[in-house]
Amino acid sequence: MAYLHWSSDLDTGIEVIDKQHQRIIDYLNELNSANESGDREATNRVLKELVDYTLTHFAFEEELQERAAYPFLKAHKRVHEIFTKRVAEFQRRAAAGENVTPELLSMLKIWLVNHIKGDDADYAESVKIMLGIEANQGKVAGGWLGIALKKFFG
């Protein structure tokens, strides 16, 4: 599988979200490398880290949307739930000894890009307004964000 690279068309304009998305892409590339090396232990470790980080990101993103009174929060949460169930099934298969990594990487790469460009782009304006971000500045104002980041990411 080809490595996934961050590009400006994935920017939401919300710096903290973009950095989290970039970290998820880094995890995908680490997973790809571990799989290509044939190191099953490293592959399983990176997969667990990727899933843990992504679930934390989802919770953080949903809290931002809730604070922003994003009207499609319920639908966005549902998309996250469906995705989480799909990944859990991959994890179950992996735990049973199946090498699901190539199939999982392919699905994750397509899903992530489509999710960022579609679902995440849809909520960005609501969240930017809530955070007091000027449309093209991309910097966050206020103290709530720091508290939320500490809550979700430690």
Image: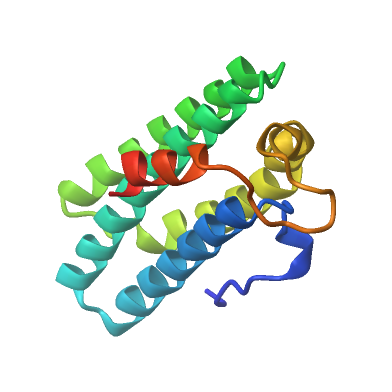
Is residue 106 at all visible to an observer of this figure? no
Where does the image place residue 45, in percent across and percent down from the top left? 20, 63
State the image quarter where residue 55 is shown: top left
Where does the image place residue 46, in percent across and percent down from the top left? 28, 64
Residue at image coords 79%, 62%: 9
State the image quarter where residue 136 is shown: bottom right
Where does the image place residue 148, in percent across and percent down from the top left? 42, 38
Residue at image coords 51%, 53%: 108
The image shows residue 20, relative to residue 57, as above or below, that is below
Residue at image coords 63%, 57%: 15
Q: Nearer the viewer, residue 104 or 10?
A: 10
Q: Nearer the viewer, residue 106 or 14?
A: 14
Q: Nearer the viewer, residue 96 or 22?
A: 22
The image shows residue 136, relative to residue 78, as above or below, that is below
Q: Tell which residue pokes out farthest to the front in this image.
A: 142
Is residue 107 at all visible to an observer of this figure? yes
Where does the image place residue 2, in percent across and percent down from the top left? 57, 77
